[in-house]
Amino acid sequence: MIGTTSLATHTLQSVDIAHLIQVALTPIFLISAIGVTLNVLTNRLARIVDRARAMEDRLREPLQQGGLEAGYEGRDLHAVLRVLARRARYINAAITLITLSALFISLVVVMLFANAFLRWDLSAFIACLFIASMVSLCAALLAFLIEVRIATNTLQIGIEAAAREERG
C-alpha cells in the first residue's frame, strides 16, 4: 500500500511539473518575441548613431573642402542632428522599456517555479509582474511608434524642402 501511494504521489508531481513547464513556456515565447523586437530597435539606434556621426563629420570639415553640400547650411545640419538626437532618445527609451519587460517576464517564470516548489502563494505577485511587463512592453512600443513617426515626418519635410529647392 505504501508503494502505491508513493507512486501515485510521484505521478501526480510529474504531471504537476509538466503542467508547470507548459505554463512557463508561454512567457518564454514572449521573451523570444521581445528579443526579435529588441534586435530591430538596436539596429535602428545604430543607424541613427551612424547618420549622426556622418552629419557631425560634415560639420567639422571646412567649407573649402566641400564639407557642407550646396543645399545644406550649418544650421540645417544642426537641425537634422537635433532630430536624430530626439529619435535616439525615443529608441533608447524603447530599448530600456522592452528590456525591463523581458526582465519582468523572466521573473514571472522564476516566480512560477518558486510558487510551485516552495508552496508560497505568489499568485498576486506573479500577476503584478506580468502586468508590469505588459505595461513596459506597451510603453516601449509607444516610444518606438513615436520614433517612427518622427522619422517619417522628417522624411516628408525633407522631400518638401527638396521640391521647393528644385522650383526655386
Image: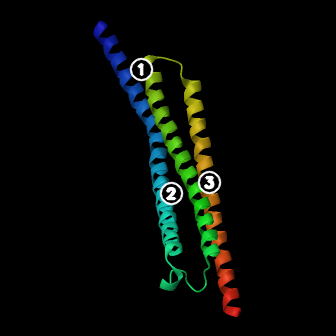
Residue 126 position within the rendered picture, expressed as x and y whole percent measured from the top left: 54, 29
Q: How many numbered badges does the structure rendering display?
A: 3
Residue drawn where x is 56% and y is 25% of the image: 123
Helix, strand or loop for disc 1: helix
Residue drawn where x is 52% and y is 71% of the image: 55
Q: Which residue is mark 2?
A: 41
Residue 13 placement, left or right of 153 = left
Res 136 visible:
yes
Q: Name the residue type under label 3.
A: Ala
Helix, strand or loop for disc 2: helix
Q: Nearer the viewer, mark 1 or mark 2?
A: 2
Residue drawn where x is 42% and y is 20% of the image: 117
**Is 84 located above or below residue 155 in the figure?**
above
Question: Is the C terminus in the top left, top right, bottom left or bottom right quadrant?
Answer: bottom right
Q: CA distance from mark 1 to mark 3?
A: 38 Å
Q: Name the residue type under label 2.
A: Leu
Q: CA distance from mark 1 to mark 2?
A: 37 Å
Q: Which residue is mark 1?
A: 117
| Res. 143 mark | 3
- Mark 3 or mark 2, earlier in chain: 2
- Mark 1 or mark 2, earlier in chain: 2
Residue 45 position within the rendered picture, expressed as x and y whole percent measured from the top left: 50, 60
Marks 3/2 in contact by CB < 8 Å: the verdict is no
In terms of depth relative to the viewer, which is nearer, 83 or 139?
83
Residue 102 position within the rendered picture, expressed as x and y whole percent measured from the top left: 49, 42
